[in-house]
Amino acid sequence: MSFSENKQDNEGSLENTIKNISLLTKFFKARLNIGYIAIPYSILGFLIHWSLQGFQLDLFTNDAWWRFVFASIIAFTYMPYVFIMNDYYDAPFDALDEKKRLRNPFCFEEIKNRKNLRLILLVPAIISLILGFLISWQAGVITIIALLLGNFYSARPFRFKERPFLDFFVHGFSLGVFFFSLGFYSFWRNAYEPFLDPIFLLILLFTFMDAAWIHIDSAILDYATDKKSNQNTTVVFLGPKYTIILLKLMLLTLLTSPAVFILLNNPLINKFGMEIVIILAILILILPLSYIIMSWGGENKYEHIRHISSRYRLYSVYFLSIFFILLSNPNFFI
């Protein structure tokens, strides 16, 4: 190969890399707002850990603050990355739907077949991984798991999104559990072992169920398209009627969690006694009971149930998060 030919190849390679980076930037801008979905889970994890430590101001160090900043940045690298990769692997299916085809840039061959584009798309994943380990080694390990699950959610050979029940499990972990854990480990103290604390495990379940509920709720909207393209998601597998039942059961788990929470809260029990705590738990069950009454017998009224469920989830999840944050403090009842 002559010098001039080698120079042309290098220039072509450089031009291709610049175009790929430009494409990645455009994809990121389009998906950047998705990062905001994850931030509340990180805030909850951070504040829950601080609350379990009694909201001691001397524990709120600069290191904890910077680790939380890293967790927040991961929300805006990991979430767009997962959605971009989902678009990449879903292009053949989205091409069957006119609206999705126009929305998914990878449906256009001149973009999807660009040389080295997949390598450029890995950049936000690498950034997420580095920041995860800067928070703590535990957060780094969880980031590795979340990246693998997020990638193989759409990629073969696993393609979890086409495996009933695994699709919402992956979503519940990769959004709820993952970002709650990042926030939690931002305030990490080695003296505390969270996985031996039933309150921590209950709140972890709460974040998982909320994130999984979001997935099932949005997947209902894609039911017709997914069925047409033979994607065996949980919603397609169950059908609309039984999916609505699953949606209701997941929301009931969220709404009953505060009753279980106070029954596990030893400082509250020590302060008021088990009898009073049981009465409080029963009173709290009015919330899920009202949801059951409002949504009773509506399994065939899909949009009606989705509307009611969305309102209950929206109005309750943030209130319950504040409830958990305040009552996780062992000094709250002293």
Image (cartoon, helix red, strand yellow):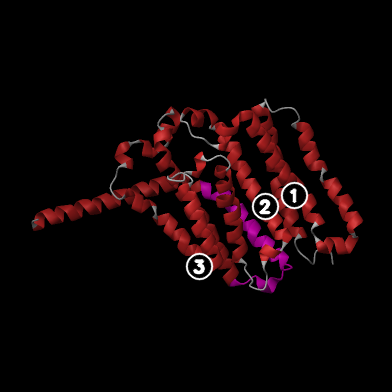
Can you tell which quarter of the image residue 50 is in? Answer: bottom right
Identify residue for label 2. 205
Mark found first going from the N terminus, 2 or 3: 3
Q: Is residue 54 magenta?
A: yes
Q: Amino acid at mark 2?
A: Leu
Secondary structure of residue under mark 2: helix
Q: Residues within 10 Å of mark 2 (few under 14, many from 20)?
A: some
Question: x, y (%) of residue 187?
Answer: 62, 67
Gap in angstroms between the C-alphas marked 1 and 2: 9 Å
**Magenta extent:** 34-62
Most foreground residue, 237 or 207: 237
Q: Is residue 138 visible?
A: yes
Label 1 close to label 2 by CB (< 8 Å): yes
Q: Amino acid at mark 3?
A: Leu
Identify residue for label 1. 257
Question: x, y (%) of residue 100?
Answer: 44, 33
When the figure is inspected, residue 217 is found, relative to residue 136, above or below; the finding is above
When the figure is inspected, residue 326 is found, relative to residue 36, above or below; the finding is below
Q: State the residue at coordinates (79%, 33%).
A: 293
Q: State the residue at coordinates (34%, 36%).
A: 108
Q: Is residue 136 visible?
A: no
Mark whose residue sits in front, 1 or 3: 1
Q: Amino acid at mark 1?
A: Ser
Q: Is residue 57 magenta?
A: yes
Q: Residues within 10 Å of mark 1 (few under 14, many from 20)?
A: many
Q: In the figure, is residue 57 to the left or right of 20?
A: right
Q: Main secondary structure of the magenta part?
A: helix
Mark found first going from the N terminus, 1 or 3: 3
Identify residue for label 3. 134
